[in-house]
Amino acid sequence: MKPIALAFVLLFAVAFSVQAQDCEQAGSNMAAVRACLYEALEKDLDAAYRPLHRKVAGKDAQAGALLQKSQASWRAFVEDSCAFTTRVNVDGAIEEDARYNCQVDFTNARIKVLKAWMGQQK
């Protein structure tokens, strides 16, 4: 693995760990911790999506509408996929933890795509 890629992976792992620790300290129970983690995940996604949407829609309203539609379709896909994955692959894990792990995987992939698209904008 290239040093830059390894550094990125380590940085992400540390950031996620710090975020999880903050949520564990802020939450009085597992439901509160999960809510905090979901909120943080949504903020990360929003931080990648909103600037891209503003930039694209500012140049081409139709492209902005298509990006918005793409985001809505992606969200529906993730919900369906994570419902399926949670149902068939719990493997002794708590169902909500399995759902969260699925959401994290899809969201991190989506953030990567959104950032790549942002990099392609002039």
Image: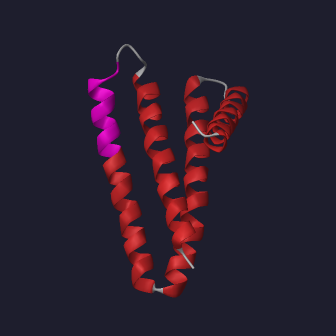
- In the figure, is residue 100 to the left or right of 37? left
Locate residue 63: give its quadrant: bottom left
Residue 85 included in the magenta stretch of the image: yes
Quadrant into which the N terminus falls: top right
- In the figure, is residue 84 to the left or right of 3? left
What range is drawn magenta here? 79-90
- 109 versus 91 height, above or below: below
Quadrant into which the C terminus falls: bottom right
The structure's colour scheme is secondary structure
Measuring from the top left, give residue 42's x and y in whole percent.
Answer: 55, 49
- 90 versus 14 height, above or below: above
- 88 versus 48 height, above or below: above
Locate residue 92: give its quadrant: top left
What residue is shown at x 56% (from left), y 76% (from top)?
A: 54
What residue is shown at x 59% (from left), y 37% (from top)?
A: 37
Locate residue 86: give its quadrant: top left
Residue located farthest toward the top when viewing the structure as drawn: 92
- 72 versus 21 height, above or below: below
User: Is residue 106 or residue 20 the one in the foreground?
Assistant: 106
Residue 72 included in the magenta stretch of the image: no
- The secondary structure that dominates the magenta segment is helix
What residue is shown at x 65% (from left), y 42% (from top)?
A: 8
- In the figure, is residue 22 to the left or right of 5? right
Measuring from the top left, give residue 27's x and y in whole percent.
Answer: 67, 29
What residue is shown at x 27% (from left), y 34% (from top)?
A: 84
Measuring from the top left, give residue 111's x and y in whole percent.
Answer: 52, 53
Numbered-mark total: 0
Measuring from the top left, give residue 43's x and y in whole percent.
Answer: 61, 52
